[in-house]
Image (spheres, rainbow, N blue to C red):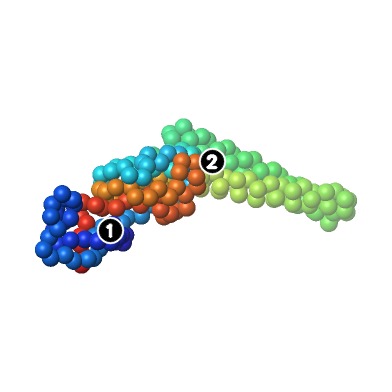
Amino acid sequence: MKPTVLCLLGALSLVAACNRGAPPPANRATGYIEATEVRVAGEVGGRLLEVKVAEGDRVSAGAVIARIDTSDTELALRRAGADRDQAQAQLALVRAGARPEDIRQAAAQVQSGQAEVKAAQAELDGAAADLERFENLLRANAGSVKQRDDAATRREVAAARVRGAQDRAQAAAETLAKLKAGARPQEIEAARARVASSDAQIATLQKTAADAVVKSPVSGVVTSKLLDTGEMAAPRAAVVVITDLDHAWANL
């Protein structure tokens, strides 16, 4: 915003100077008539879809001067809206906790795991008994080394099955406990943060879309049109120049 010179010769009385039929004043002075000049620009850049004014047009404060293409912003807004919906759904999910059917299923898996442990333990007990029997026979010279070794192998396999069944049963029990306890406070806070982040992104994109409508900050006359419809406007690059003629002043 800067003053612009409107004419090179002024008078002490502007009314007398503008009235050519009036006799010249007794006292004359030379100087400048100046007015504030505003370079109107958009906050964002892009292709100008429309420039609504021409040089010489009088505009009022808040009048729309130009519109910038917002196609990319609108696409980004739709994506951000979908992300926000997903984040909100995740927050609702962690707040609600596990469904009763999920808890029942987890409890059934715990029972199944416990049964598997018992079956594996019974197999291990049987394999251990066989090994002890074949060792006794071997000591009494009534059995063979191969029988004893085979029994030892079966006991090792059975012991491995017991350990595996115990691990699965423990995992099932932990899952059931987690479902019953519900989401941790940290998980709920993380879900809330994702919703807040989506809201902030949407607000930013909405502001970008609003900034694509270039409005005049002052009333005045369009004294220069710098860009036309279809041209690319850089961010904060002036589209038109508006001069506030209603508040001109004399600089003598």
Give the left or right position of residue 231, taking residue 34 as reference. Answer: right
Q: Nearer the viewer, mark 1 or mark 2?
A: 1
Q: Residue at x 11, y 63 (%)?
A: 26
Taking depth in this image into account, of 111 and 252 the one nearest to the observer is 252
Look at the picture and state if 44 lies above or below 50: below
Per the image, label 2 sits on a secondary structure element best described as helix
Q: CA distance from mark 1 to mark 2?
A: 93 Å
Taking depth in this image into account, of 213 and 238 the one nearest to the observer is 238
Give the left or right position of residue 144, taking residue 57 as reference. Answer: right
Q: Residue at x 40, y 45 (%)?
A: 212
Q: Which mark is residue 110?
A: 2
Look at the picture and state if 108 lies above or below 117: above
Question: Can you identify the residue that label 1 sits on?
Answer: 7
Q: Position of residue 104 (x, y in %)?
A: 47, 34
Q: Which mark is residue 54?
A: none
Disc 1 marks which amino acid? Cys
Can residue 179 be seen?
no
Q: Position of residue 181 (x, y in %)?
A: 41, 46
Q: Residue at x 46, y 41 (%)?
A: 229
The 10 Å Cα crowd at callout 2, few under 14, some 14 to 19, many 20 or more, is many
